[in-house]
Image (cartoon, helix red, strand yellow):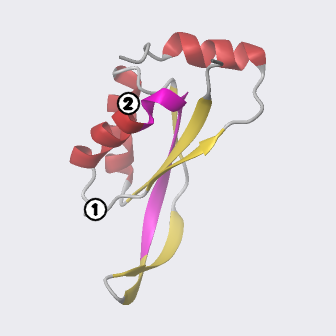
Amino acid sequence: MALRFIDIWVNCPDRGTAERIAEVCVSERLAACANILAPIASRYRWKGAVEQADEIPLLLKTRAEHFNAVCEAVRPLHPYEVPSITATDISHIDQAYADWLRAETKEPA
């Protein structure tokens, strides 16, 4: 079976949260790279009300097999009751970049 890669998006309430999650995921080799993006304005429904907040998007680049492990790493570091943790499959990837992602992430357990 071919190795699959994903981008995992996590919206964080502040830069400090994004930095802590990025550090853990890269240090533990759950992700090869973490991009902390510019603040965004989010508007969403929460418990029946429309809310808004500034958030910091975090993009983690990893193997598809690490998705559940990343979720487990993120939840205790994230202050939201229900953090947004979503993944997008990478359908096309440069071979050299794929080789780097594979080399910089640990083998799944």
Residue occupying the far front of the picture = 1
Residue 34 lies in magenta, yes or no?
no
Dot label at residue 25:
2
Return the x and y of residue 60 as percentages of the image width and height: 51, 37
- Depth order, front residue of 18/91: 91
Q: Position of residue 59 (x, y in %)?
A: 53, 43
Q: Position of residue 81 (x, y in %)?
A: 25, 63
Q: Residues within 10 Å of mark 2 (few under 14, many from 20)?
A: many
Q: Residue at x 34, y 39 (%)?
A: 21
Residue 19 as seen in the image, left or right of residue 94: left
Residue on which the image places disc 1:
80
- Residue drawn 70% across the image and 19% down it: 97
Distance (Cα) linking label 1 and label 2: 18 Å
- Tell me: 42 left or right of 4: left
Which residue occupies 74% across, 36% down? 91
Q: Is residue 29 above or below residue 58?
A: above
Is residue 56 within the magenta segment? yes
SS category of the residue bearing label 2: helix
Q: Is residue 6 above or below residue 101?
A: below
> Magenta segment, principal secondary structure?
strand
Front residue (pair 26, 102): 102
Magenta residues (range): 53-67
